[in-house]
Image (spheres, helix red, strand yellow):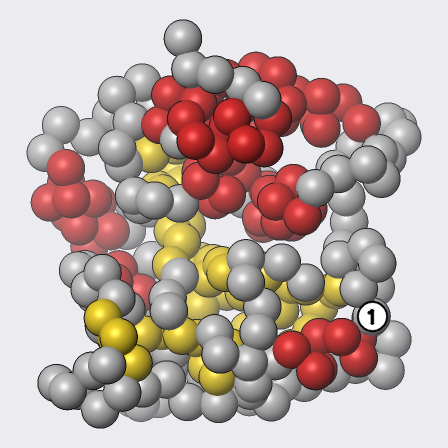
Amino acid sequence: MSSRNTDVSRAEIMIGAITRMLQGLRHVAVGNSSPIPGSAALLARAISGGSLRVSLLGSRKHNSFTDGGRELFDCAAQGRIDAFFLSGGQIDGAANINLVGLGDYPETKVRFPGSFGSAYLYHLIPRVILFREEHTPRTLVPKVDFISAAGVSPKNEYRPGGPYALVTGLCVFLFDKERRRFRLQSTHPGVKSANVREATGFDYIAPTTVPITEPLKTDELALLRSEVARQVAETYPAFAAKTWGVVNG
């Protein structure tokens, strides 16, 4: 078995955590402006030997869709996407996300990019992984100011999709569907449970013993920093340059 490499960045720890969640799936879709999930999806595909289909919106090389978002929505409705990723200006303990703005709508003081089809995809895709590199009380809040996409629905409502996990720059939460709350699954290397508690605005289930987030194996990390980094640079050139010093072309 390959050894582990502890000399990794926070982004690479997040990529590794997400990669583990994609193993054994058939089709993963990644929206725009999502370089960390996009990197994880491409790494998971490389590890699988190409058996994982990755639809990376915004990419010409790693996206078989020819009709943009509309085709993504059709595939989700047909049950042909296993995992997707969402983030937000705010995320709360019920896995609600806010993509609209801060303050009382419509008099929002700060505006975010907009909800787009997040609510639709959140309800249909079975494994929605939330992500946010910044882990502070201002981003992970007790209750979002505006619900762009709801984490939970009434129990009598048909909903095949929903939150699976939340990966941040400090830790990994898994979503407990029965208790409708996040559970602290692991903390990243160098991060203590107390650090997570202090930085999190919402309440969550905290086990007595919390493991460290499993890092990438040495060969997986090498694959990420070479072949996958070059693939990432095609869609996210600034991220690839900053993270790995890889320049597209």
Viewer-proximal residue, 13 or 126? Answer: 13
Examine the rendering and report whether any part of residue 78 can be seen.
no
Residue 108, how many percent across, how many down?
20, 82
Residue 189, how many percent across, how many down?
81, 55
Left or right relative to 146: residue 184: right
Left or right relative to 163: residue 32: left
Name which residue lies at 36% across and 73% down: 97
Residue 111, how many percent across, how many down?
22, 70
Viewer-proximal residue, 199 or 18? Answer: 199
In terms of secondary structure, where does tag 1 sit?
A: loop
Residue 62, how many percent across, how many down?
34, 24
Badge 1 is on which residue?
192
Viewer-proximal residue, 139 or 143? Answer: 139
Name which residue lies at 29% across and 43% down: 32
Locate the C terminus and report the quarter of the image it occupies: top left
Name which residue lies at 10% across and 34% down: 67
- Near mark 1 (Cα within 10 A), the count class, few <14, some 14-19 or many ≥20, is some
Name which residue lies at 76% across and 75% down: 195
Which corner quadrant of the image does residue 55 belong to? top left
Name above or below for residue 126 compared with residue 145: above
